Image: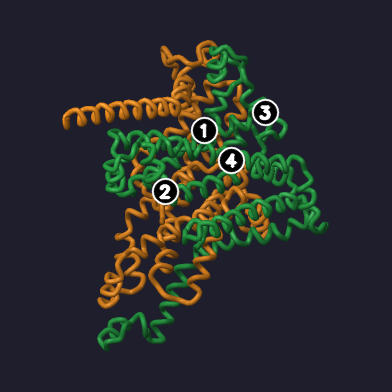
């Protein structure tokens, strides 16, 4: 009603609202923000501060936390070989993802291109693993990784080719590669989807003009496709790194972080030492360290790309 | 001369097509190998799993499938997962849309602060937050809110960690609706609520469908939140139950295959129906500038 009157009087309602209208507007905004804000503050923001507080205690979650040990947990974490191993593993997964998984997705996307007949069918099939749950993915692959060549397909193939069977999940030197293989199976379709969309957004005229000028497929790829995909590639890199830092479910179900911590990541470490062993003070410190990893990476990414981007916040 | 160039161009094109299909088909086969082996396994006896693990089950052996779908355990997991998924998706879509609408369409003090606050969630994903969230859940539980070992706890945590991303996606859709629509709606006496409910929501329906499909998948596949929140097995969701089932029957490979197959079927069916929305949700979320 107020708005109607305001417009009759030739007021722009948005610019000079009556006090009553403004009050109503404020109430409306408050009520619309409230449910999301409450849940978000309670379960996302507040936990950060709560674990920051408890990370200074030696506390097993039973009874009140009384034994404040300052930075003791952090010192212990950074001298724990298993945690250092888990950081190393995360870095290995990041490097492998960026060095193998993304290029693979990129090559396959370029092969599908923009007008290959059956393009959408390939996209549908390559993306399917992303939709299958991590638990199901992990169990499915555990069956294939069975060390006994009579039971596990992969070793059957290895033996058929004349090699000795490999302890895919039992050999501490191999296990991380096996895990990475599964992660690639599951996630390369996601990156492919991003790349395919990016490729479709490249103006067709550019490629045609290059071809008329005599560019071959490789020149086309390196001088047109790649530079024009750079934004998509950046997004992909961001998602891939952040995803690697928090890798948990596939590894937990397949190996539990073993054998002998060989496939431990920061998230499985936090779950095992924090929640399973109920060392909540120590686990809080691990959570804070992981949070800092994500934060620092996000800020670095923002600094380096200098592009407004919703993923990183601004 | 012209003809020769044309034909050599088209042979080259045919060759390159052949190469493209060859590589892509090999990749497709590699993707489907584990899925097909799993499907085969689900129709075998464990004895067959050991004697002939990679062949087509002949004749198919339905006992494992039947024994799973005739017990209440499986259906109970299914029921819990469906319940959590429906509530999480509905509430997340609704309250993210409300926030996005306010952020994209109305002016108020502290707007940037609210927006920046929600972006924190992008840097604090659930897998990193799981122990901190656990701390808060036990604290709230001690204060008398029944959130540990309850599906409400799972739902609330899932919603909270879905908010950031979906608010960012929906905000950009709400922003793209032309301001003229808003002006004329208000001139016609529309209240904020009417404008949101009767004009904006219908206009961004495709975006809502995209966002909803992504939440359905995230909630349905989530292991970690149910893993820390739920204790009693009658509350377990499908991924949690599947993981426990594998732990319990780890020697019976055929039975596990059958269980995993059954628990993956709903996801795959959903994927084939909602693929368009899922794809547009992911591209809207990621390929932005």
Q: What quarter of the picture does the N terminus of chain B occupy?
A: top left
First along the sequence among labels 2 and 1: 1
What's the CA distance linking mark 2 and mark 1?
34 Å
Relative depth, front residue between B42 and A141: A141
Horizontal and vertical percent position of residue B31: 44, 29
Q: Which mark is residue A137?
A: 1
Quarter of the view holding residue B23 = top left
Instruction: Say if labels 1 and 3 share a chain.
Output: yes
Q: The numbered mark 4 sits on a residue in which chain?
A: A
User: A164 left or right of A278?
Assistant: left
First along the sequence among labels 4 and 1: 4
Q: Residue at x 48, y 77 (%)?
A: B109
Q: Colour of chain A?
A: green
Foreground disc of the pair 2, 4: 2
Residue wearing tag 2:
A227
First along the sequence among labels 3 and 2: 3
Tell me the crowding category of disc 3: few under 14, some 14 to 19, or many 20 or more residues within 10 angstroms, Cα based. some
Relative depth, front residue between A146 and A200: A200
What's the CA distance linking mark 4 and mark 1?
22 Å
């Amino acid at each position: 009603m107020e708005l109607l009157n305001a417009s009759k009087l030739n007021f722009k309602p948005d610019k000079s609202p009556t006090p009553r209208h403004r009050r109503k507007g404020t109430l409306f905004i408050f009520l619309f923000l409230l449910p999301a804000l409450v849940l978000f503050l309670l379960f996302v923001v507040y936990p950060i501060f709560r674990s920051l507080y408890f990370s200074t205690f030696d506390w097993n979650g039973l009874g009140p936390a009384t034994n404040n040990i300052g930075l003791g947990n952090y010192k212990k974490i950074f001298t724990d070989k298993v945690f250092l191993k888990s950081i190393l593993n995360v870095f290995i997964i990041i490097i492998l993802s960026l060095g193998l998984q993304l290029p693979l997705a990129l090559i396959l996307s370029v092969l599908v291109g923009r007008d290959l007949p059956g393009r959408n069918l390939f996209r549908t099939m390559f993306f399917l693993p992303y939709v299958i749950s991590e638990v199901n993915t992990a169990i499915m692959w555990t069956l294939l990784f069975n060390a006994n060549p009579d039971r596990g397909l992969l070793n059957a193939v290895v033996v058929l080719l004349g090699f000795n069977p490999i302890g895919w999940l039992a050999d501490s030197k191999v296990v991380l590669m096996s895990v990475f293989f599964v992660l690639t199976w599951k996630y390369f379709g996601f990156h492919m989807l991003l790349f395919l969309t990016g490729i479709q957004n490249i103006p067709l005229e550019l490629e045609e003009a290059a071809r008329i000028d005599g560019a071959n497929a490789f020149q086309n790829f390196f001088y047109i496709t790649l530079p024009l995909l750079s934004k998509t590639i950046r997004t992909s890199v961001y998602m891939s790194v952040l995803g690697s830092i928090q890798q948990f479910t596939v590894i937990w179900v397949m190996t539990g972080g073993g054998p002998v911590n060989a496939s431990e990541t920061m998230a499985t470490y936090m779950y095992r030492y924090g929640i399973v062993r109920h060392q909540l003070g120590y686990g809080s410190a691990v959570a804070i360290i992981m949070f800092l990893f994500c934060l620092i990476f996000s800020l670095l990414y923002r600094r380096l790309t200098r592009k407004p981007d919703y993923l990183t916040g601004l | 001369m012209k003809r020769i160039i044309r034909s050599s161009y088209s042979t080259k094109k045919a060759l390159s097509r052949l190469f493209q299909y060859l590589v892509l088909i090999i990749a497709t086969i590699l993707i489907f190998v584990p899925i097909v082996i799993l499907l085969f396994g689900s129709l075998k006896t464990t004895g067959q799993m050991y004697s002939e693990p990679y062949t087509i089950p002949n004749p198919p052996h339905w006992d494992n499938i039947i024994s799973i779908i005739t017990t209440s355990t499986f259906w109970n997991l299914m029921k819990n997962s469906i319940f959590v998924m429906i509530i999480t998706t509905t509430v997340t879509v609704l309250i993210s849309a409300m926030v996005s609408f306010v952020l994209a369409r109305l002016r108020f003090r502290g707007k940037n602060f609210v927006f920046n606050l929600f972006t924190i969630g992008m840097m604090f994903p659930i897998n990193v937050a799981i122990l901190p969230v656990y701390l808060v859940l036990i604290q709230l539980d001690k204060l008398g809110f029944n959130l540990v070992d309850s599906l409400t706890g799972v739902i609330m945590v899932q919603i909270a960690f879905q908010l950031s991303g979906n608010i960012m996606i929906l905000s950009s859709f709400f922003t793209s609706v032309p301001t003229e629509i808003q002006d004329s709606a208000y001139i016609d006496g529309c209240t904020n609520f009417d404008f949101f409910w009767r004009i904006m929501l219908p206009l961004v329906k495709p975006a809502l469908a995209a966002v909803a499909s992504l939440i359905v998948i995230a909630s349905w596949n989530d292991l970690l939140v149910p893993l820390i929140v739920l204790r009693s097995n009658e509350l377990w969701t499908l991924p949690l139950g599947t993981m426990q089932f594998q732990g319990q029957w780890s020697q019976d490979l055929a039975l596990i295959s059958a269980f995993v197959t059954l628990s993956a079927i709903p996801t795959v069916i959903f994927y084939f129906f909602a693929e368009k929305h899922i794809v547009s949700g992911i591209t809207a979320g990621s390929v932005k500038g």
